[in-house]
Image (cartoon, helix red, strand yellow):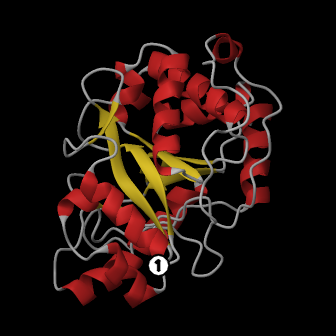
Amino acid sequence: MSGVRKARIGAIRERECATVADDEHMMPGRRRMARGPNAAAAAALAGVITVLVAACGTPATPTATATHATQSAPATQGTPTHQPPPAPTNGPWVGPYDYLAAGGPSPAEVMKATGIRRFTLAFIVSDGGCQPVWDNGDPLTGASEKAAIRGIRSSGGDVAIALGGMGGTKLGLACTSPGALADVYQQVISAYRLHSIDLDIEDTELGSADARQRIIGALAIVRQHDPGLMISITMAADSDGPLPDGQDLITEAATAGLHIDAWTIMPFDFAGPGTDMAQASVQAADGLK
């Protein structure tokens, strides 16, 4: 096992970050979401949680960043200009995906039924160029998304926002430099005063070595600008853990000295009928080691 891989394992074990997910009720497309009665759907959503940045504490400042990233750094580097609202201090440390465009129970209903206080709202994609939009076509600060976030926060909760997902044009492909991509990430962070973001990196970005390097470089710039931001990366897996391109991304980020708070996986659609999905998901998560 390489020194980079051993160091990565140690960091993951030390921070005790993992992904726990079930095969049921995931997002549209590769993620399927429950659409039954509201109470049942809310309870189901609580059981389909991907643990993002769970109880990992404040992220450490990376010991190094990619050279090309600092060369492309935007002028906004330094102290963050946005001031996130206070993070919740109660409720489970989980952040289930909520794909607002799919309908279903409102975040307020889920909060009431489950005690969950944190949500990962999905998904931000490219507008066809290097600008962010929601994947249902809404602008970044769309009225329905702003209302949902305001409702969650007024009830004592908070949100992360996921960039990527199965549909739409990926920002890691549409933006042509780490600096440009970092500017887009920062737009999203500042627009909603975020404590954390999730990058849901699908096969088109993950399979491109150039896109992987842009993402790593962009996150290094964002991390320099906002060291307290919590960053998770979610990617596809099979029953043995991350796919080869995902393993490459982890190794490349570690080589660049980029600190990621949580590497998470999508543990579903990789087992046939009768498979113990709980055990298969644990096995897949163990593959992150």
Q: Which residue is mark 1?
A: 155
Q: Is residue 269 visible?
A: no
Relative to 180, does residue 279 appear above or below in the rendering? below
In front: 259, or 151? 151
Residue 276 image point, x, y percent: 39, 74
Q: Is residue 136 left or right of residue 57?
A: left
SS for tag 1? loop
Relative to 111, does residue 58 appear above or below in the rendering? above
Q: Is residue 10 visible?
A: yes
Q: Residue at x 54, y 70 (%)?
A: 94
Residue 130 image point, x, y percent: 36, 22
Residue 68 image point, x, y percent: 65, 12
Question: What is the number of callouts on the image?
Answer: 1
How packed mark 1 is, by other alpha carbons closer than 10 Å (few <14, some 14-19, many 20 or more), is some
Q: Name the quadrant of the N terminus.
A: top right
Q: Amino acid at mark 1?
A: Ser
Going by the picture, which residue comes out furthest to the right? 63
Q: Residue at x 35, y 74 (%)?
A: 107
Res 4 quadrant in image: top right
Q: Is residue 114 left or right of residue 42?
A: right
Q: Is residue 230 left or right of residue 178?
A: right
In front: 97, or 254? 97
Q: Residue at x 61, y 73 (%)?
A: 88
In front: 165, or 107? 107
In front: 184, or 52? 184
Residue 173 image point, x, y percent: 37, 21
Q: Is residue 230 left or right of residue 1?
A: left
Res 77 quadrant in image: top right
Relative to 44, does residue 211 appear above or below in the rendering? above
